[in-house]
Image (tube, rainbow, N blue to C red):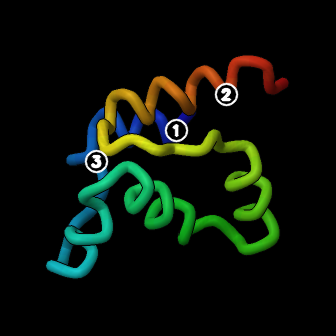
Amino acid sequence: MKIAGALERPSTVSQDDAAREMITNTPLGTILYLASGIPLGERAKVYAALPRLATESFAEAAQLIRQAAEPLP
């Protein structure tokens, strides 16, 4: 749910340099950037729980993530 929230408020993602700004200008890029701070063993679980995101819309991506998270404990 934190990832969905970050997608709805992209300004919460730190963008200290131009490369990071380029990476985080799409929902998928933002997710990859946010997940880079998760330990490797846990990162695979996070990726597996996320739905396939074929959208450039941050709001739509956040909604898809929330829908996928609803059945999770």
Crowding near the residue tagged with mark 3, few <14, some 14–19, many ≥20 C-alpha atoms within 10 Å:
few
The residue where tag 2 is placed is 68
Marks 2 and 1 sit apart, C-alpha to C-alpha, by 13 Å
Horizontal arrangement in the rendering, residue 33 relative to residue 20 (left or right): right
**Figure check: 65 above or below 38:** above
Locate residue 45, reporting x and y percent: 79, 55
What secondary structure is found at the residue carrying circle 2? helix
What secondary structure is found at the residue carrying circle 1? helix
Which mark is nearer the camera, 3 or 2?
2
Res. 21 mark: none
Q: Residue at x 61, y 21 (%)?
A: 67
The residue where tag 1 is placed is 2
Of callouts 3 and 1, the N-terminal one: 1
What secondary structure is found at the residue carrying circle 3? helix
Q: Residue at x 67, y 27 (%)?
A: 68
**Three-letter amino acid code at the position of disc 2:** Ala
Q: Residue furthest left?
A: 18
**Figure check: 70 above or below 4:** above
Locate residue 19, reporting x and y percent: 23, 81
**Figure check: 40 above or below 10:** below
Crowding near the residue tagged with mark 2, few <14, some 14–19, many ≥20 C-alpha atoms within 10 Å:
some
Of callouts 2 and 1, the N-terminal one: 1
**Three-letter amino acid code at the position of disc 3:** Thr
Decide: marks 3, 2 in contact (CB < 8 A)?
no
Q: Residue at x 43, y 35 (%)?
A: 61
Horizontal arrangement in the rendering, residue 34 relative to residue 27 (left or right): right
The residue where tag 3 is placed is 12
